[in-house]
Image (cartoon, rainbow, N blue to C red):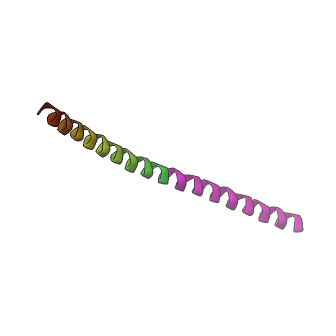
Amino acid sequence: MDSVIVSTVLVNILLGCFSLAVLSWVFVGVETFIHDRKREKREEESAKRDAEYHVKRIEQLDK
């Protein structure tokens, strides 16, 4: 009887650890996705600002 209880407890601990590992993996994946989206938006805005700066700088050089 004791071996059944011990094995049940060990299986529950193993399932709990596996569940925590999966949940942390999902959390990291979602966080990475959100961070990548924000970085892409910042890079697009930076490229737009750089292009505008370049155009203004060329206009100043032509004067």
* Quadrant of the drawing holding the N terminus: bottom right
Q: Is residue 47 magenta?
A: no
The picture quadrant where one finds residue 40 is: top left
| Number of marks drawn | 0
Residue at point 79% right, 62% down? 10
- Looking at the image, residue 60 sits to the left or right of residue 41; the answer is left
Q: Residue at x 13, y 31 (%)?
A: 62
Q: Is residue 6 left or right of residue 30?
A: right
> Quadrant location of residue 13?
bottom right
- Majority SS type along the magenta span: helix
Expressed as whole percent of the image width and height from the top left, the position of residue 26 reads 54, 53
- Residue 9 in magenta? yes
**31 w.r.t. 1: above or below:** above
Kindly tell me whether residue 1 is visible in this rendering: no
Residue displayed at 18% across by 39% down: 56
Q: Position of residue 5 (x, y in %)?
A: 82, 67
Q: Is residue 41 visible?
A: yes
Q: Of residues 57 and 41, which is closer to you in this image?
A: 57
- The picture places residue 3, in percent across and down from the top left corner, at 88, 64
Q: Is residue 27 above or below residue 40?
A: below
Q: Please, which residue is most extreme toward the right here?
A: 2
Q: Position of residue 27 (x, y in %)?
A: 53, 56
Tell whether 60 sits left or right of 7.
left
Q: Residue at x 23, y 36 (%)?
A: 54
Start and end of the magenta stretch?
Answer: 2-29
